[in-house]
Amino acid sequence: MKIIVAGDYQEMSRIAANIIAEEIKKKPDLVLGLATGSTPLGTYRELVRMYKEGKLDFSRVITFNLDEYYGLSPDDKRSYHYYMYRNFFDHVNVRPENIHIPDGTARDVEEECLRYDEEIKKCGGIDLQLLGIGVNGHIGFNEPGDELLTATHLTDLAPDTLAANARFFGSIDEVPRKAITVGLGTIIQAKKILLLASGPEKAAIMAELLDDDAVSTRVPASFLLLHRDVTVVMDKDAAAKKR
Ligand code: F6R
């Protein structure tokens, strides 16, 4: 694992955007796995800036988002569809047909999960996967448990996740209880992984992940320790408890 500690959130975002930009320059038809949440917002801002300055072209990039809340329609302001268009896709030239986000309103969820994995396979798998991390160590919405699933699936969100994401919904009761997420197999098979962490609330999990050097289904992100090409970029606050 390559670990970069940035001075602050801005610097973390700039470093992350530069890593993504370099990969797109090397492979213009990059298959890019994308995350939502607070952490990558600055990275998306930087990527949009690079595009607007004519330094980056997304016209051949293919994207796959990690997850979507179950039951939220794409035009729901709290959905990850809405988030992605508002913060990224509306401002860059990713072709609509190259954008993939799980459909949280699919009638047949199992079918939707199979379809999503098929699409990823058809594109040759993920080249670069951008990840955030939950306070409980989740990646995507692969929550801690006795077992972790490899394929895209419908999952129950953990109490920690409901509490952490309540800020986007007004109250914890409004947070959908379930989400569709790509599985750990899809994430771990990405050729390259970029994990971002920011803020003091991530310090404990980052210390556990990076200092313990152990793999456990109780810390889903720990499976990243088995991957040969992971770059962690975190700000000082997230790195504060690391030995
Ligand atoms: C989002 C996702 C989640 C988040 C994680 C951290 O698509 O898959 O794993 O990355 O919950 O969220 P923030 O960045 O809001 O702290």
Image (spheres, grey):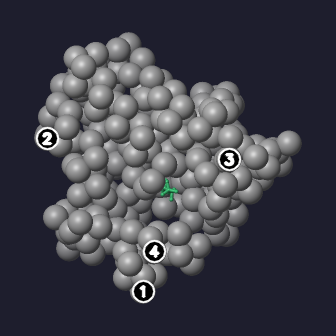
Q: Nearer the viewer, residue 51 or 62?
A: 51
Cβ of mark 4 under 8 Å from ligand 1: the answer is: no
- Label 3 sits on a secondary structure element that is helix
How many other residues sit within 10 Å of disc 4, few (<14), some (14-19) or many (≥20)? some
- Displayed quadrant of residue 179: bottom left
Q: Which one is earlier in the sequence, the residue at label 2 or at label 1?
A: 2
- Label 1 sits on a secondary structure element that is helix
- Label 2 sits on a secondary structure element that is helix
- Displayed quadrant of residue 102: bottom left
Q: Position of residue 22 (x, y in %)?
A: 42, 17
Cβ of mark 2 under 8 Å from ligand 1: the answer is: no
Residue located beneath label 2 in the image: 96
Q: Position of residue 107 (x, y in %)?
A: 20, 73
> Does the residue at mark 2 contact the one at mark 1 (Cβ under 8 Å)?
no
How many other residues sit within 10 Å of disc 3, few (<14), some (14-19) or many (≥20)? some
Front: mark 4 or 2 = 4
Residue located beneath label 1 in the image: 173
Task: Say what amino acid the circle numbered 2 marks.
Answer: Pro
Direction bottom: furthest residue: 173
Residue located beneath label 4 in the image: 166
Direction left: furthest residue: 96
> Does the residue at mark 1 contact the one at mark 3 (Cβ under 8 Å)?
no
Front: mark 1 or 3 = 3
Residue that appears at 17% across and 31% down:
93
Residue located beneath label 3 in the image: 237
How many other residues sit within 10 Å of disc 1, few (<14), some (14-19) or many (≥20)? few
